[in-house]
């Protein structure tokens, strides 16, 4: 915002009826909103050089795009490495879960036999 560029709105010419209404405490009728883009009065932004036939004749066609990669090929061999590693992780996890279940089962059996031995010893003592 630059205060030097501020332009006050022009005084609105009121009709006789509106002047009487405003003098008696009423509000003045609304003013028309300025038209155009952002209240500037400009309604269209056009690039004039686009309409110039001489400028279009001077422009040559753009060069073809640069050469890039060849045709698209499926990379199945490279993805097998990642999928193989994931499969290996799944197998390792399954193996660890099986071992943990077996260990838990044996530990439970050991605990139960120890408790039975302790109960037997208490009855004999």
Image (cartoon, grey):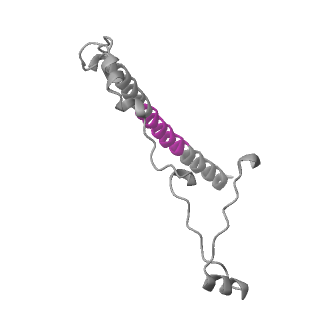
Q: Quadrant of residue 80?
A: top left
**111 and 60: which one is in front?**
60
Looking at the image, residue 110 lies above or below residue 93: below
Residue 121 among magenta residues: no
| Residue name at image x 66 percent, y 53 percent | 122
In the rendered image, the residue lying farthest to the front is 16
**64 and 93: which one is in front?**
64
Q: Does 33 sit left or right of 99 as displayed?
A: right
| Numbered range of the magenta stretch | 94-110
Query: Residue 105 placed where, x, y %?
Result: 48, 43
- Prevalent SS, magenta region: helix
| Residue name at image x 64 percent, y 55 percent | 123
Residue 98 among magenta residues: yes
Looking at the image, residue 66 lies above or below residue 121: above
Q: Quadrant of residue 73?
A: top left
In the rendered image, the residue lying farthest to the bottom is 24
In the rendered image, the residue lying farthest to the top is 67
Question: How many numbered tags mark residues here?
Answer: 0
Looking at the image, residue 29 lies above or below residue 125: below
Query: Residue 10 placed where, x, y %?
Result: 66, 63
Query: Residue 51 placed where, x, y %?
Result: 35, 32
In the rendered image, the residue lying farthest to the right is 3
| Residue name at image x 69 percent, y 83 percent | 22
């Amino acid at each position: 915002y630059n205060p030097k560029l501020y332009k006050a709105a022009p005084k609105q010419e009121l009709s006789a009826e509106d002047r009487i209404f405003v003098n008696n405490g009423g509000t003045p009728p609304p003013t028309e909103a300025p038209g155009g883009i952002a209240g500037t009065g400009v309604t269209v932004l056009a690039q004039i050089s686009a309409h110039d036939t001489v400028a279009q004749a001077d422009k040559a066609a753009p060069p073809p795009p640069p050469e890039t990669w060849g045709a698209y090929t499926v990379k199945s061999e490279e993805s097998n490495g990642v999928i193989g590693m994931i499969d290996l992780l799944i197998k390792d996890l399954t193996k660890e879960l099986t071992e943990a279940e077996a260990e838990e089962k044996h530990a439970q059996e050991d605990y139960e036999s120890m408790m039975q031995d302790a109960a037997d010893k208490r009855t004999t003592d």
